[in-house]
Image (cartoon, rainbow, N blue to C red):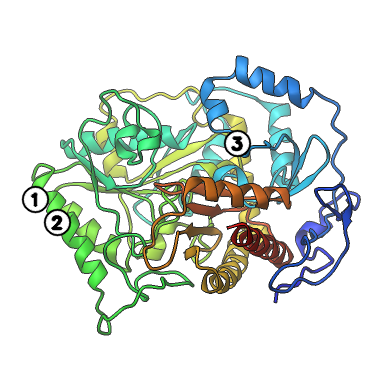
């Protein structure tokens, strides 16, 4: 049984502000009264209260915003707009968002796993304001303290020999830069990544990205090869002991102790890629420790360790894309690659690095950096003083607020409870992830593991939003719900979401 607790505990309650109304509006406009929720759900879950009062919205009408969105914003903006009834966001604070009508939402998507320590976190906001009053911008042709303070602090969070920092403006830019550096350093050209991956939308990173939705019908990504993703739920091989996750798959496993057939088979596929699709010497291998956009896909234990060895034997460097998994989100470690017991040659990062401020980075070794110094690399906004001040405050806040531990505790709890829902509902095929990087794969049925159709996903997605929770969706077929909240959520928030998710699935099953 899930019980919604009536008070918000922990750090968030003490931050500031007046108490905001915690009643939850029904579709008819009536208020839902407080109660306990059991299976099957009979009423709407009630949000935990919060100690923050948003400003009253007095700006542009929703109709006018949609008109401008259609006429002046690029057409892709309309294409990616979530929900039949879109959310018009006005203000955010920690794990909460408010729309222009004053309705509050629990944000469990964090702007695509980007808001790491909380919307408008007071400490980070104060750091930005302080820097804005001192110096907005200068480039690194001059020496200014915030750049050097941040580079030293970021490097201290990475193992040797990963100590040289290149600051960029986005994850796509960081991955594009890493591709160039790998090719110059190795003298080779070909780069391997997983099917289903997303590494950016630039002309070069489009080749790394292996998802048709992000492809354009032009020549792109020359020299990029996609190999089979070692997905132990959706792929041809997998069992119930394969992955480093609190929740394993529902698939049977007949492997002997310390043996993993799935690991061996997927490594065999990588070897086949080496034998058939690339030259004998390659430039790099890109891999997210947990696939983000691809659906929070996790690999068999020790797969990355073996893959790194095979790549290095062929002259390549190993690149960990930590754009979504970095900065404590996986809970057990600060970086996702640490959970695989590997040390990459380059680490790319963005999103949570600045809590939503546009920023990215590549961190690499002195040896690779020396290879890249043969030409002039210059980035006007990379290392901007405000960006560095914000990112430095994010690192401090992660430590001071204990967000990595929150990710581990709340994330593990969420996954374990979601696994109970998986066992209850035929359409929940898999629950996976680590910390607050969680994927819930929806299926037609557990026997086939075929993806639940997009229209069904959209129904459930909309229902969850209408009950006051924002989540994401992704995967190659759009079949996976993403739960990647700001790393400040509480157990009360988790219980609220679990009650909402249970009711949304229950509603869908009744309609079906």
Per the rendering, the mark at residue 357 is 3
> Which residue is found at the position 34% from the left and 77% from the top?
252
Circle 3 crowding by C-alpha within 10 Å: few under 14, some 14–19, many from 20: many
Q: Which residue is mark 2?
A: 271
Element class at badge 1: helix
Q: CA distance from mark 2 to mark 3?
A: 40 Å
Of mark 3 and mark 1, the one earlier in the sequence is 1
Of mark 2 and mark 3, the one earlier in the sequence is 2
Q: Please report contact status of discs 1 and 2: CB closer than 8 Å, yes or no.
A: yes
Q: Nearer the viewer, mark 2 or mark 3?
A: 2
Q: CA distance from mark 3 to mark 1?
A: 42 Å
Quarter of the image where one finds residue 134 = top right
Q: CA distance from mark 1 to mark 2?
A: 6 Å
> Which residue is found at the position 34% from the left and 64% from the top?
232
Element class at badge 3: loop
Percent across and percent down for residue 485 are 61, 53
Q: Please report contact status of discs 3 and 1: CB closer than 8 Å, yes or no.
A: no
Q: Is residue 326 visible?
A: no
Q: Which residue is mark 1?
A: 275
Q: Nearer the viewer, mark 3 or mark 1?
A: 1
Circle 2 crowding by C-alpha within 10 Å: few under 14, some 14–19, many from 20: some
> Which residue is found at the position 47% from the left and 49% from the top?
453
């Amino acid at each position: 049984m899930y019980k919604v607790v009536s008070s918000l505990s922990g750090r968030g309650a003490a931050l500031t502000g007046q108490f905001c109304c915690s009643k939850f509006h029904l579709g008819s406009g009536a208020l839902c009264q407080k109660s306990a929720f059991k299976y099957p759900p009979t009423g709407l879950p009630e949000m935990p209260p919060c100690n923050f009062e948003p400003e009253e919205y007095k700006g542009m009408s929703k109709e006018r915003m949609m008109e401008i969105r259609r006429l002046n914003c690029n057409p892709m903006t309309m294409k990616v707009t979530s929900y039949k009834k879109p959310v018009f966001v006005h203000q955010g604070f920690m794990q909460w968002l408010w729309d222009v009508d004053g309705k509050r939402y629990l944000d469990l998507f964090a702007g695509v796993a980007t808001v790491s320590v909380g919307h408008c976190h007071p400490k980070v906001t104060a750091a930005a304001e302080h820097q804005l009053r001192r110096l907005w911008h200068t480039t690194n042709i001059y020496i200014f303290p915030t750049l050097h303070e941040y580079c030293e602090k970021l490097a201290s969070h990475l193992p040797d020999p990963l100590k040289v920092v290149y600051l960029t403006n986005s994850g796509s830019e960081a991955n594009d830069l890493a591709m160039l550096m790998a090719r110059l350093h190795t003298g080779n050209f070909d780069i391997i990544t997983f099917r289903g991956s997303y590494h950016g939308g630039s002309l070069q990173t489009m080749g790394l990205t292996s998802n048709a939705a992000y492809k354009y019908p032009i020549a792109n990504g020359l020299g990029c090869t996609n190999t089979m993703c070692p997905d132990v739920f959706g792929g041809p091989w997998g069992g119930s002991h394969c992955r480093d996750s609190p929740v394993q798959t529902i698939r049977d496993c007949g492997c002997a102790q310390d043996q993993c057939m799935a690991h061996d088979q997927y490594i065999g596929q990588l070897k086949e890629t080496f034998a058939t699709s690339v030259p004998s010497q390659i430039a790099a291998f890109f891999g997210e420790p947990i696939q983000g956009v691809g659906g929070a896909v996790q690999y068999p234990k020790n797969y990355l360790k073996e893959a790194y060895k095979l790549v290095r034997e062929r002259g390549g460097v190993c690149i960990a894309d930590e754009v979504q998994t970095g900065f404590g989100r996986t809970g057990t470690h600060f970086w996702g690659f640490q959970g695989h017991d590997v040390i990459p040659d380059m680490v790319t990062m963005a999103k949570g690095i600045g809590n939503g401020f546009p920023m990215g980075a590549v961190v690499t070794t002195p040896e690779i950096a020396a290879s890249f110094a043969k030409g002039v690399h210059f980035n006007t906004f990379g290392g901007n003083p405000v960006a560095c001040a914000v990112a430095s405050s994010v690192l401090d806040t992660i430590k001071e607020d204990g967000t990595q531990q929150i990710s581990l505790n709340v994330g593990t709890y969420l996954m374990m409870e979601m696994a109970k829902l998986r066992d209850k509902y035929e359409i929940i095929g898999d629950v996976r992830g680590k910390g607050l990087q969680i994927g819930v794969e929806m299926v037609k049925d557990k026997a086939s593991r075929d993806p639940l159709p997009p229209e069904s996903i959209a129904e459930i997605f909309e229902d969850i939003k209408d009950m006051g929770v924002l989540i994401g969706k992704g995967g190659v077929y759009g079949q996976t719900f993403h739960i990647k909240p700001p790393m400040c959520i509480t157990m009360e928030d988790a219980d609220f979401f679990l009650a909402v998710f249970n009711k949304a699935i229950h509603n869908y099953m009744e309609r079906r």
